[in-house]
Each structure stands twice: as C-alpha cells, then as structure tokens.
Image: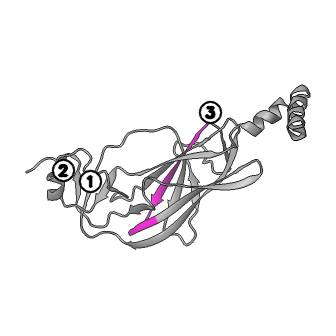
C-alpha cells in the first residue's frame, strides 16, 4: 500500500506544479513516420502478349504491370508521401536506395501506354539505379530552386517526394528506406508498394500498344 500512496502523491504533485504536460507526454503516442509509396509509370510492362491481353476483358488486367521507362527514356516514378504520426515535427534526413539485382530487360511480353493523371507538387529527385553508388539528385520541376534533404514533416504538414527512376537497359529490383530523426534518435522506414521488393525495367525492344488496343480486336 505505501507504494500506491507514493505513486498517487507523485501524480498529484506533478499536476499541481505544472507537470501536466509531462504526464501527457507519457501517455501520448511516440513520434513516428508514416510512408505511403506508389510506384508507377504511364507505360507499364506485362509478360502477356497482345492476344492474351485481349482475352481478358477485366479493367484490372494490367494490375500487376511493372513500371517501365518509355522508349524516349522518360523515367518511372516512385511517389513517397511522408507524414508524421503526431503533431510533433520530425526531420527526414534522406532516402536510401539499394539495388538488389539487375538483369537484361524482358524479351517477351508487351508495353501498354496508360493514361496518367496529375498530383500534388512534390520534391523531385533523379535516381540512377545503375550507378555504382545510388544517390538522390534533387532537380527542379517548375523552374524553382531544387530542394533536397533534410526536411521537416508533421501530421498537418506532409511532404511528397517523386523519385524519377532510371534503370537504363536493365530490369532492376531494388529497396528503398526513408531515414529520419525524432527526439535525437535515428530511425528508418522501409518502403513497400504491395510487393516484397520494388521493380522497374527499361523498355528494350518490346512492342508498345495503347490501353484501348488491349480491348479491341482487329
């Protein structure tokens, strides 16, 4: 019983002496980072032929399509939306990209051009996936000054990053980690887009079709 009285006395003292903020801090969630990832491109690669695509009437026939650079080397895009879990701002110090494997681009299948919509204004980075040391190079998308790391995010002030992925003439599997600091401690968050690893490929010499062509028979 003496221990119970001691705890009660400590709580009462904290509240009386202005320690309510300290108690709230003990009960509130610790600072953390939420990362939403979406890897995509306007053209997508599928291992199916045009005839196989036409035999599938569903609207999600390309749901498992692989992000691919276009024939004129437009990059695939990995959009990362970063948001703190609490109102306390945290500092994102960078993003680490690791190439896990790189092979030749596929020689069978198809590339289908999809329609692409707009998005919020992100911080844009070029990422050469075949570089010896992969780094994020900040670029300007609207003529303004390119901005890199570090950056601050909170629950009411998220940031979106756009990683422009360039695999060259390779089929690349890779991982991505977001690095951040809160309350003086370093953390990392592994990025996922519904798959164990991320993947992007160059176009190679595969045939290219419009999305409408995958429904229409000649």
Closer mark to the observer between disc 3 and disc 1: 3
Residue holding disc 3 = 156
Earlier-in-chain disc, 3 versus 1:
1
Earlier-in-chain disc, 2 versus 1:
1
Please tell me whether mark 3 sits on a helix, a strand or a loop.
loop
- CA gap between label 2 and label 3 equals 42 Å
Q: Position of residue 136 (x, y in %)?
A: 57, 58
- Dot label at residue 214: 2
Tell me if residue 105 comes above or below residue 125 in the rendering: below
Main SS, magenta region, reads strand
- Asked if the residue at tag 1 contacts the one at tag 2, i.e. Cβ–Cβ closer than 8 Å, the answer is yes
Please tell me whether mark 2 sits on a helix, a strand or a loop.
helix
Residue holding disc 1 = 112
Looking at the image, residue 196 sits to the left or right of residue 135; the answer is left
- The residue positioned 45% from the left and 61% from the top of the image is 196
Task: Bin the neighbour count of mark 2 within 10 Å (Cα to Cα): few under 14, some 14-19, many 20 and up.
Answer: many
Range drawn in magenta: 157-173
Task: Bin the neighbour count of mark 1 within 10 Å (Cα to Cα): few under 14, some 14-19, many 20 and up.
Answer: many
* Among the 4 quarters of the image, the one containing residue 190: bottom right
Is residue 61 shown to the viewer in this render?
yes
User: How many circles with numbers are drawn on the protein?
Assistant: 3
- The residue positioned 62% from the left and 46% from the top of the image is 33
Coloring applied to the structure: one colour
Task: Bin the neighbour count of mark 3 within 10 Å (Cα to Cα): few under 14, some 14-19, many 20 and up.
Answer: few
- CA gap between label 3 and label 1 equals 37 Å
Is residue 168 shown to the viewer in this render?
no
Q: Position of residue 18 (x, y in %)?
A: 88, 28
Q: Position of residue 117 (x, y in %)?
A: 38, 39
């Amino acid at each position: 019983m003496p221990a119970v009285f001691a705890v009660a006395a400590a709580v009462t003292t904290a509240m009386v002496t202005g320690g309510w903020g300290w108690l709230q801090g003990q009960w509130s969630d610790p600072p953390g980072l939420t990362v939403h990832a979406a890897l995509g491109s306007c053209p997508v690669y599928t291992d199916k032929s045009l005839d196989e695509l036409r035999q599938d009437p569903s609207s999600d026939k390309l749901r498992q399509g692989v992000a691919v650079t276009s024939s004129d080397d437009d990059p695939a895009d990995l959009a990362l939306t970063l948001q703190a879990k609490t109102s306390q701002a945290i500092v994102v110090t960078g993003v680490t990209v690791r190439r896990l494997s790189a092979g030749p681009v596929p020689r069978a299948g198809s590339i289908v051009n999809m329609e692409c919509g707009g998005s919020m204004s992100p911080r844009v980075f070029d990422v050469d996936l075949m570089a010896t040391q992969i780094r994020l190079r900040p670029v300007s998308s609207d003529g303004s000054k390119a901005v890199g790391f570090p950056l601050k995010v909170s629950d009411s002030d998220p940031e979106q990053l756009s990683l422009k992925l360039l695999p060259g003439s390779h089929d690349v599997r890779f991982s991505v980690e977001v690095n951040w600091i809160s309350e003086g401690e370093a953390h990392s968050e592994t990025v996922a887009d519904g798959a164990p690893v991320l993947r992007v490929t160059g176009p190679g010499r595969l045939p290219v079709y419009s999305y409408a062509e995958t429904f229409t028979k000649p």
